[in-house]
Image (cartoon, rainbow, N blue to C red):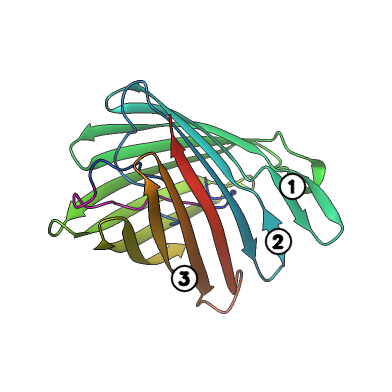
Amino acid sequence: MLSLALWGALSIPSAAADPVTTDSPTISRSSHAVGQGVVVLEANYNYSSSPSVHSLPILVHAGLTENFEVRLETNSLTWQGSQRGLADVALGFRYEFEPNWGIVGLVTLPSGAADFRTSRAVPFVSLNHDQPLSDVDGLLFNAGASLLPDGSTQGLGTIVYSRMVREDVSWFLESALIGSEVRVDTGVQVWLQEDFVVNLALLRGLSGSGQEWGGTLGFGSRF
């Protein structure tokens, strides 16, 4: 869902004892579904420069089976200068078809305020793979694409290295190619309890166009 904030999933190595895993604060999305009967709520504050945009991304994903979940995500309240309003909503799914391999499909619907609304539905699909390296670190890969309203295709490729630096703290470094834009970001997640995590990340654009830098602060909670 490249028209939204592009929050992704941080692959959590097995050093943590079954903690909640979230799709923020990385651009990448994990291969893992949340599990049958599980609901995960994620909420963040996001800022990006060039242009200066503030938003409050929200993601809700609910497991219908152990390996299939439905998803609702939106940047919700968004403001850019004098423009303020609700962003579009995206509906989709994640299917973990093999251990550590998953597919995410989303459709962004033209449902937001006029200043932030896409002119037509925007489909997005990605193939996601988690690759554990040890009990405390791992890699996450995403490859995907969206069909933009003008009929062009925008690709997405990401790689994340993550490491548990303590039993309740994980650090990550990510590189992402979004269309022609190259971005890197780094951040931490801190588990206050198994079902609640807070996250912080900083992002830098390297392509000389589009977003120059940004940051996010938020939480994830499992029910």
**Furthest residue to the left?**
134
Compare marks 1 and 3 and give the one earlier in the sequence. 1
**Furthest residue to the right?**
82
Q: Distance of mark 2 from mark 3, alpha carbons? A: 19 Å
The quarter holding residue 186 reads bottom left
Residue 135 in the figure: left or right of residue 172: left
x and y percent of residue 117 in the render? 73, 42
Residue 169 in the figure: left or right of residue 109: left
Relative to 33, say whether 6 is above or below.
Answer: below
- Residue under the image location 42 percent in, 66 percent down: 187
Q: Nearer the viewer, residue 38 or 119?
A: 38
What residue is shown with label 2? 53
What residue is shown with label 3? 182
What residue is shown with label 1? 116
x and y percent of residue 109 in the render? 63, 34
- Residue under the image location 25 percent in, 48 percent down: 129
